[in-house]
Amino acid sequence: MIDQVLELHPGAQRLHVGCDEVYYLGEGEASRRWLQQEQNSTGKLCLSHMRAVASHVRARRPGVTPLVWDDMLRELPEDQLAASGVPQLVEPVLWDYTADLDVHGKVLLMQKYQRCGFLRLWAASAFKGATGPSQALPPVEHHLRNHAQWLQVAGSGPTDALQGIILTGWQRYDHFSVLCELLPAGVPSLAACLQLLLRGGFDEDVKAKMENLLGISSLEITDPVREGAGSFPGRSILALVTQVSLHLRSSVDMLLEGNRYVTGWFSPYHRQRKLIHPVMVQHIQPAALSLLAQWSTLVQELEAALQLAFYPDAVEEWLQENVHPSLQRLQALLQDLSEAAAPQPPPTGPAGGAAQDPRGELVPALGGSAANCRPGQKGPM
């Protein structure tokens, strides 16, 4: 993999080789046998592999510096790190994507790495992703706070140790997770975080200029992109994703769980048995059809916009995760409504007698309130 990347990027000066979050370190059969030998440990195993990978990079391209995300290094003893040979081969990237990172702890960690022989250090922040595996819109305030605190670390740490900040923008939490925020949805957050780093802060004046430049009413996700405004790539995707994320599920929930006619006269009990009073169809069907038509039109626009920026499988995945479940709930309601409203054959009972339900009880005719009462009970007045 390293050879392929180096061939594709002949002018690269640095190569991110990962080495982070090795949750199952030492659990392979060969590793277990190696760990049974005296003085071997998972820390030593990690460092030996890191050294092998970095050495391969250096041998293939002496001018390329491997960058390693640092979480596997943080807890290792200083003497073990210093003796491993890794500090002469790689530059660690201290990563933290939280909005309340420990500034003092990061400064102490930088000092530790310097004592171990790492001459140059990096920081890694996040402008999108990192706040939820299925997040659709980045919480901009969270990411701004993350960058502001990294500036505090840079200002408090060892002089000239920190080479720069790498702004990460996750697309997935791992190769098996769903898509999180799409890049177009993260453009305003990226622009805001870059401005904060360049200016050393993000006051109201900077915020207003950013919003005007991007053509958005607010950096917060509660406000969609202004119709027809903005000049940044992906603005139409952001506008449509915002509408879907903020209103699709809630509008369907409101109809299915908050509409008194649906909950009172076409509940799951009624839907399973295909029972509905004809009058109630007129109270439910038009609203459901209108909502479905409204969202179907918007989703067609969103799909067309996504197809301009993403491969078909990514478009299919995002729509299937974020759009189709709500639309399918609407379509299922309308299907059940249609079947329940269709003419039903009259119930038949014993010759000359009333129809009976499976328990042998008399089935009263639908109509007045007494239809809901057992014999001997009065209906509600």
Image (cartoon, grey):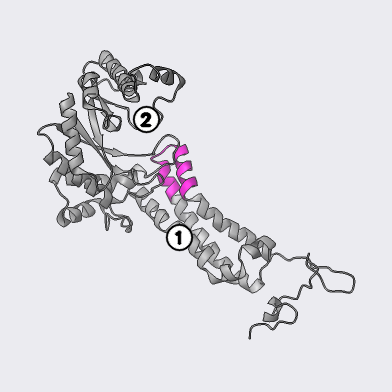
User: Residue at 61% across / 72% down in the picture?
Assistant: 280
- What residue is at 65 percent from the left and 65 percent from the top? 270
State the SS at label 1: helix
* Residue 291 versus residue 370 in the image, above or below: above
Magenta stretch bounds: 302-322
Residue 258 at what x, y percent from top left?
50, 67
User: Furthest-left residue in view?
Assistant: 159
Q: Earlier in the sequence, mark 2 or mark 1?
A: 2
Q: Position of residue 195 (x, y in %)?
A: 18, 46
Q: Main secondary structure of the magenta part?
A: helix
The three-letter amino acid code for the residue at tag 2 is Val
In magenta stretch: residue 305: yes
Q: Residue at x 46, y 49 (%)?
A: 322
The image quarter containing residue 168 is top left
Q: Residue 250, which numbered label?
A: 1
Q: CA distance from mark 2 to mark 1?
A: 39 Å
Query: Is 300 part of what is drawn in magenta?
Result: no
